[in-house]
Image (spheres, rainbow, N blue to C red):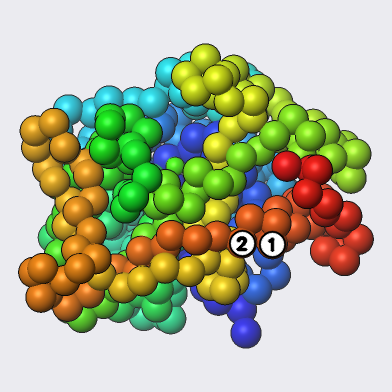
Amino acid sequence: MEKKVIIDCDPGIDDSLALMLALRSPEIRVAGITVVAGNSPVEMGVGNARKVLSFMHRLDVPVIAGESRPLAREYVNALDTHGADGLGESFLPEIPGDPAPGLHGVTAVDFLEENLLHGGCSLIALGPMTNLARLAEKNPAALAAAEEIVSMGGNFRSYGNCSPVAEYNYWEDPDAARLVYHTMGSLGRKIRMVGLDVTRKIVLTPTLLEYMNRLNPEVGGFVRKITRFYFDFHWIQERLIGCVINDPLAVAAFLDPALLSGFDAFTDVEVQGISMGQTVVDAMKFWRKPANSTVYTEADVPAFWKMFLSRLTGVPEEEIDFPERRF
Ligand SMILES: [Ca+2]
């Protein structure tokens, strides 16, 4: 049966790849895209989501602008990583038209509340958790009514990607992440945490990109256009040839939970000081609190790539030849 989902995101290069994967997956129906300030300022994020939808011929999916700044901190964008336009300096043309016809006056929080409360709807959160936190403030039961919440964010054993210990989404709005984890825990629910421990394993290499281009030049060309800047960033920052694409793994985990494995634990988020944004995962149960998260530590990387390449290019999985050398 088709699973209904809202994707909350901050596109963002890897968000865009995640949206592409979701829109090419027949098992799910994307009911809407809510945008939050994160990688890109919120209005830019709405425009970028529309650019991706236009490429995918899916402008029927509503895009709703959400929170433009974190709960308490000053907003810091990540355009140094994602390019001046938030889409790798591809400078694709803006898509004219109404991003959310028929939804005038409906905020992202209203949209989330309505859908989560009344309809077996899940949430894939690919940006800072500010929209989710505003929902937690307004109507915690609506947040907890989500069928599933899969969050790209946090880290357990792996180091941070915007401070020594913190992952970007939770660092950008640590107060929001903390509120969402606490709210879910207090209502007996768990967040599926797809953090850097697993997303770091997902590196789009030049070989994989070229392979994608051979399989489907139109899609490969689009992905190349939006990732070139990201490749440069990873080389300068980490001397890595390729780019880590975090967000599509959260969509893949939603589609096929068997791709990832980990453990259940109580997770808290530090909101200040040098560890701000760090996820503190109580793996050894010091605090004796009920688990509010499933923390993933292992990923089936070849299976992810098979799914991703097949769905984006339209080539059946069994025809995706995937020897180790493709890494
Ligand atoms: Ca993102």
Q: Is residue 273 above or below residue 298?
A: above
Determine the secondary structure under disc 1: helix
Residue appearing at x 83%, y 51% in the figure: 323
Residue 315 in sight in this render: no
Determine the image quadrant of residue 65.
top left
Residue 248 in sight in this render: yes
Residue type at mark 2 is Asp
Residue appearing at x 21%, y 41% in the figure: 277
Q: Verify CB contact (< 8 Å) between mark 1 and mark 2.
A: yes
Residue placed most toward the observer, 183 or 96: 183
Residue appearing at x 8%, y 69% in the figure: 287
Q: Which residue is mark 2?
A: 300
Outermost bottom residue: 1
Q: Which residue is mark 1?
A: 303
Determine the secondary structure under disc 2: loop
Q: Position of residue 57 (x, y in %)?
A: 72, 49
The answer to whether 18 appears left or right of 327 in the picture is: left
Q: Position of residue 132 (x, y in %)?
A: 27, 57
Ligand 1 shows up in the quarter that is: top left
